[in-house]
Image (spheres, coloured by chain):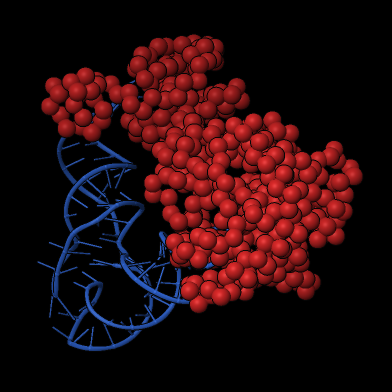
Amino acid sequence: MITKPKGCHDIYGIEAKKWQYVNKLIDSLMEKYDYTFIRTPIFESSEVFHRGMGDTTDVVTKETYDFVDRGDRNMTLRPEGTAGIVRSYIENKMYGNMPNPVKLYYNGTMYRYERPQSGRDRELTQFGVELLGSDDPLSDAEVISIPVNLYKMLGLKEIKVKINSLGDTESRNNYRDVLKKYFEPHLSDLCEDCQERFMKNPLRILDCKVDKDNPILKNAPKTLDYLNEESKLRFEKVKEYLQALEVDYEVDPKLVRGLDYYNHTVFEIEAHVEGFGSNNVLGAGGRYNGLVELLDGPVTPAVGFACGIGRLMMALDLENIDLPVKNDVEVFVMAVSDTEKNYAATLVQSLRMSGFRVEMDYTNRGLKGQFKQADNLKAKYLVILNDEDLAKNELKVKNNKTKEELTLGLDYLLYYLDEVLLEDEPYDENYEKECSCDGECHHDHNCQKHHEEGEE
RNA sequence: GCGAAUAUGGUGAAGUGGUUAACACGCCGGAUUGUGGCUCCGGUAUGCGUGGGUUCGAUCCCCACUAUUCGCCCCA
């Protein structure tokens, strides 16, 4: 059997409906924030990511899907969204031909060659936002508020927003030196990974899991103490705006992000539901003034974030949030004989064109089988055709909940359904007709009699 | 890149070195000659991830591989 590539997933059925629901919500939310959707290629010249994300980051050095195309060009499947969008911003001269600031959002798949585990796939879907052309602290705060509001709208409760500031390039470099000097004499007391980090990215030592209780770490100098006045002021402003936007946050001086391009504001939103794996960052981002320049564009301040949809779905699942996805059918048309089926085909089509969600049988089931199928599909109304009725230009409609059935003239069906399905109430799964046993049966349906008696 | 666990039908799973691999759910059909959801009956794996080995004989023992899951690293 051919299997899917490692770390990838097939999303289908009810799961797919949930994804679609979330995607629609994202689209409508972004419309309100006046961000426009941008779709960039799923692969780019490798250079885009090498220059954009930094040659030393793990993501670029050992986690990309690289290939040489038939024209001998070095290509890379995008491991994240920002670099490609900045490339597009520059190439399309958006700084000149779109209203400033340029507000873009994306929602697509990213690729990282990693060992899969809970919350980490090789193909992942990220929704993210880039706001280019504003250095206003309000833009930082607003960008942070977007995923927070999305999560709120979906009903997530167990989330935590952490923010920090790395300061401008000057502050960041200054801090980096201070940190190196501080750690150097203690190097042998740190874990192996930290010794590695000391060379490559000393800031990351701060959020080491192994050494997190090590006093050396606890007493390490804090980013915030090394911000210059301007950066400090800026951070204060961001916090004020966050309060104005009613975003609950906590300042985490140890928060540093992995990608090279961040400066000033950085943030992470963590899931804190019981059962979430160790990769519990739902979304993260920050300011990346300087990246546009780095990719040969004009000096342009920018902020953005990205959040993993897969992780979001995990969080929704663990918080037992039921998304209001339509998982039912409004009308199931039943037909057995050839003439019935023929009429059904026409009828089903016209009902669909009128806007109803309609199903019928395609496997030559008997009437009984069709009733069963209608239940499986959670049909709200059943249209039952039979040759006798059809001869009189009539058909039967049955409310699958109350079991009331009536005979209608063929021409009246549409009006009837229009009337009756006006309120789009979802199929009630818990509704079951009272069964004829005397409370003694062991049926696993939710017999109403049993409910009333307080039984299972 | 490193470490650990797991691998039986559509699903959840039991199980044994040796005749027909439990059970439950699901699905299909029948009892009910076209109005069901209960009940009853019947059907549903050329066979226990793949390839080797041990053995008279392996799904069950050994090895390798692969896949999945979880953790480290890293990251959303």
Q: Eyeballing the image, is B27 above or below B45?
A: above
Q: Quadrant of residue A227?
A: bottom right
- Where residue A426 appears, as percent x and y from the top left, is 45, 24
Q: Which chain is blue?
A: B
Residue at position x 49%, y 52% from top?
A280
- Residue A206 horizontal side relative to residue A426, left or right: right
Residue at position x 42%, y 11% from top?
A407
Pick the residue in front: A1 or B45. A1
- Residue A98 horizontal side relative to residue A392, left or right: right
Query: Is residue A417 shown to the viewer in this render?
Result: no
Pick the residue in front: A213 or B50. A213
Residue at position x 36%, y 14% from top?
A404
- Where residue A124 appears, as percent x and y from the top left, is 57, 54
Q: Eyeballing the image, is B55 above or below A78?
A: below
Residue at position x 42%, y 44% from top?
A273
Pick the residue in front: A49 or A435. A49
- Residue A327 horizontal side relative to residue A283, left or right: left
Pick the residue in front: A41 or A204. A204
Q: Give the colour in which the image draws chain A.
A: red
- Where residue A214 appears, as percent x and y from the top left, is 46, 65
Position of the C terminus of chain A, as image quadrant, is top left
Counting the numbered discs, the total is: 0
Position of the N terminus of chain A, as image quadrant, is bottom left
- Where residue A199 appears, as percent x and y from the top left, is 62, 74
Query: Is residue A200 shown to the viewer in this render?
Result: yes
